[in-house]
Image (cartoon, grey):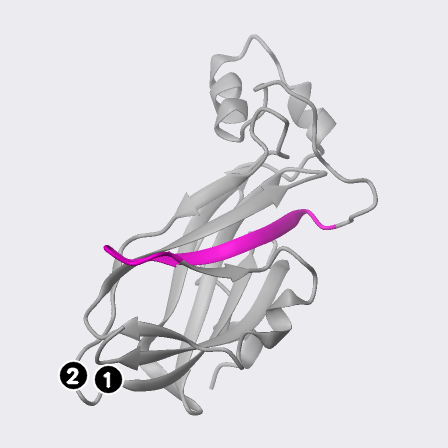
Amino acid sequence: MASHDEDLMPESTSGYKLSQPKQSLAEYQKMDENDESLQRYKESLGLGGGGKDLSDPNDPRVCIIYSLSMESPGRPPVVIDLSTPGSESSLKANPFRIKEGARFTMIATFKVQHEILSGLHYVQAVKRGKIPVPGGKTSEMIGSFAPNTEKNPVYVKKFAEEEAPSGMLARGHYNASSSFVDDDKKTHLHFDWSFDITKDW
């Protein structure tokens, strides 16, 4: 049986290795400026966009998750505020409602600082009571990012649209555990939360 920590790690791709060793931000900036493929690689990370680096020298975190929100057509967004350290501790005791069969999209807002963040994933495991829900573990690749600047102060990632289960057996209370994890298996944020699948909003 997988451990709780393994439940919240992205699936490994057999034979996959990082295309190049991890380097400092300064090393990325100094890469050969005449190499077109390297220029494209740096641009894909958000380097070279200009603007003042917003990294906070007093905050050692590399990735700061500001919020995770759920948007559903015709409904105001439900926002999980994660901006303050410790704010996630009360989430499990305050479930939010999702109407059965409703379509919804999750959106993460976050900041990167100090160094390149490589291969950030959002991993979620859902249980009903203590029993894992079939298909309840999901992993979504968010991407690799350079530190935010004044020109691009936050990153926003919109996930693939999902559909809530429906039917009498699907209704009820669910517990979820979520993590933001990078390619180095470093967990940038872990939090437990809960939701109720209901007949109506």
Helix, strand, or loop for circle 2? loop
Query: In 3D space, how far apart are the residues under numbered discs 2 and 1 (Cα atoms)?
Result: 5 Å
Stretch of the chain drawn in magenta: 61-77
**With 191 as the anchor, is 163 left or right in this view?**
left
Looking at the image, residue 24 sits to the left or right of residue 101; the answer is right
Q: Amino acid at mark 1?
A: Ala
- Give the x, y percent position of residue 76: 34, 57
Mark 2 = which residue? 167
Q: Does residue 74 show up?
A: yes
Image quadrant where one finds the C terminus: bottom left
The amino acid sitting under disc 2 is Gly
> Helix, strand or loop at disc 1?
loop
Circle 2 packing at 10 Å, graded few (<14), some (14-19), many (20+), is few
Q: Does the stretch in magenta take in 138?
A: no
Q: Residue at x 43, y 74 (%)?
A: 125
Q: Marks 2 and 1: CB-CB under 8 Å?
A: yes
Instruction: Return the residue nearer the eye: 77 or 55.
Output: 77
109 vs 151: above or below: below
| Residue 170: mark | 1
Q: Is residue 70 magenta?
A: yes
The residue that appears at 53% across and 12% down in the rendered structure is: 35
Tell me the crowding category of disc 1: few under 14, some 14 to 19, or many 20 or more residues within 10 angstroms, Cα based. Answer: some
Q: Is residue 79 above or below residue 56?
A: below
Residue 14, located in which quarter of the rendered image?
bottom left
Give x and y (percent) for residue 177: 50, 74
